[in-house]
Amino acid sequence: MSAMQHPTSAPSAYTIHIATDFTRTPGGRSSRNGKYNGEEFRTRWLEPALRDVPARFERVVVDLDGVDTYIGSFLEEVFGGLLRGTFERYNDAARVLEIKATGEFVVFRDLALDYMRRQDAKNAEAR
């Protein structure tokens, strides 16, 4: 199991709760798809937090619980998008990013991890 699948108790983790910090109704991939889109979350919330690793935090936790639902394109843009810009390899992201989900939201965590692995495979082919 990846470190991104286990809850953290480290006090030096920064947690972003999508439902309370961003929105309960995440949208699509980009601003063309309306407000609260994946590109906005990635560029305004997640990437800035990741830039603070390791200066301020050991890791960033994204908590997927509590939203109405997710659209696949939102998750792909956020998590697959990290491997198109912020990280080149899945393992690099796994060292500093944890995706937390419980209950009905576990399927979305698994989908987000799958998008990251798919992008990692595309990156490997291009190397």
Image (cartoon, grey):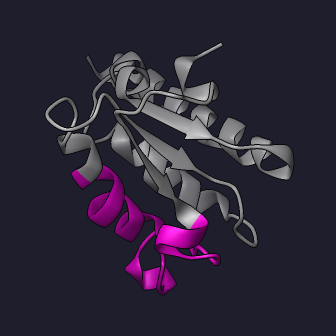
Residue 52 drawn at (x, y percent)? 19, 42
Residue placed farthest to the bottom in the image?
34
Give residue 109's position: percent from left, percent from top: 67, 41
Quadrant of the rendering where the C terminus is positioned: top left
Q: How many marks?
A: 0
Write down the region rendered in magenta: 19-48
On the question of residue 19 being in view, the answer is yes
Q: x%, y% of residue 119?
A: 45, 33
Any part of residue 115 in sight: no
- Where residue 65 appears, as percent x and y from the top left, is 69, 56
User: Does the magenta portion include 52?
Assistant: no
Q: Residue furthest top?
A: 1
Q: Give the residue displayed 61% in from the left and 30% down from the top.
A: 7
Q: Is residue 35 left or right of residue 63?
A: left
Residue 38 shown in magenta: yes
In front of the other: 20 or 85: 20
Quadrant of residue 114 within the rendered picture: top right
Q: Residue furthest front?
A: 11
Residue 55 falls left or right of residue 83: left
Q: Residue at x 60, y 42 (%)?
A: 112
Which quadrant: the N terminus?
A: top right
* x 56%, y 54%: residue: 75
Q: Is residue 45 above or below residue 2?
A: below
Name the residue rendered at 54%, 63% in the picture: 18
